[in-house]
Image: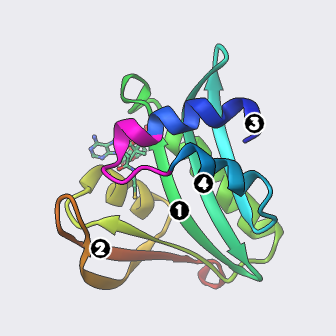
């Protein structure tokens, strides 16, 4: 992600999440050395993105989202592939994330990549209130 993608990523954030990142927060990530954002672009338009924080050998996914009209075409798969490749190159121990308990598309997507349920946080999300499922992909298992 570079500055020219900020608006597109922000639009996806507001479309997909009840507590979207502000444009300023996204912009701050451009200068954060531990943050890694990848975008999927079609005909100049941002159609998906993924963001992760890397702490030594650990990856923490912030969010992955794809514009509604471009879903079920493998865009999120391509984005997660980027992160997994990054993780392998950088000898990560694991990549982890939280997901809403009811978000079956996302849970199914992560399972395909070998993320397994690693825990649960009661009432972690608001608007609406919902449990978070922690899912982790361990690289040492491969
Ligand atoms: C979850 C999301 C990122 C998937 O993006 P996508 O580009 O449509 O995903 P892909 O086309 O790469 O699909 C990969 C896998 O995800 C799962 N998946 C995607 N959409 C699904 C759906 N509607 N129902 C069930 N599983 C689904 C499937 O396992 C799929 O594999 P398959 O095609 O072999 O069945 C997208 O639905 C989205 O942006 N949702 C809103 C934002 C969100 O909830 N993000 C996750 C926050 S933790």
The residue wearing badge 1 is: 62
Q: Is residue 66 left or right of residue 86?
A: left
Residue 71 quadrant = top left
- Would the CB of label 4 be found within 8 Å of ligand 1? no
- Circle 2 crowding by C-alpha within 10 Å: few under 14, some 14–19, many from 20: many
Give the image location of residue 109, x and y in percent.
41, 53
The residue wearing badge 4 is: 25
Give the image location of residue 54, x and y in percent.
71, 72
Cα gap from disc 3 to disc 1, whole angstroms: 19 Å
The residue wearing badge 2 is: 132
**Residue at 77% over, 82% down:** 56
Proximity of marks 2 and 4: CB atoms separated by less than 8 Å:
no
**Residue at 67% over, 32% down:** 5
- Circle 4 crowding by C-alpha within 10 Å: few under 14, some 14–19, many from 20: few
Image quarter hosting the C terminus:
bottom right
Q: Please state the extent of the stretch shown in magenta in the rendering.
A: 13-21
Residue 138 quadrant = bottom right
The residue wearing badge 3 is: 3
Nearer to us of marks 3 and 2 is 3
Give the image location of residue 66, x and y in percent.
46, 37
Q: Of marks 2 and 4, which one's residue comes earlier in the chain?
A: 4
- Circle 1 crowding by C-alpha within 10 Å: few under 14, some 14–19, many from 20: some
Give the image location of residue 88, x and y in percent.
75, 68
């Amino acid at each position: 992600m570079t500055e020219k993608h900020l608006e597109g990523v922000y639009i996806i954030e507001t479309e997909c999440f009840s507590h979207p990142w502000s444009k300023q927060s996204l912009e701050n990530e451009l200068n954060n050395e531990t943050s890694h954002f990848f975008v999927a672009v079609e005909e100049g338009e941002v159609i998906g993105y993924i963001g992760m924080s890397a702490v030594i050998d650990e990856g923490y996914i912030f969010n992955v989202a794809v514009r509604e009209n471009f879903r079920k075409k493998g865009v999120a798969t391509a984005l997660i592939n980027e992160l997994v490749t990054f993780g392998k190159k950088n000898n990560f121990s694991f990549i982890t994330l939280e997901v809403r308990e009811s978000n079956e598309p996302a849970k199914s997507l992560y399972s395909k990549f070998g993320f397994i349920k690693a825990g649960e946080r009661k009432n972690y999300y608001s608007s609406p209130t919902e449990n978070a499922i922690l899912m982790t992909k361990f690289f040492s298992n491969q």
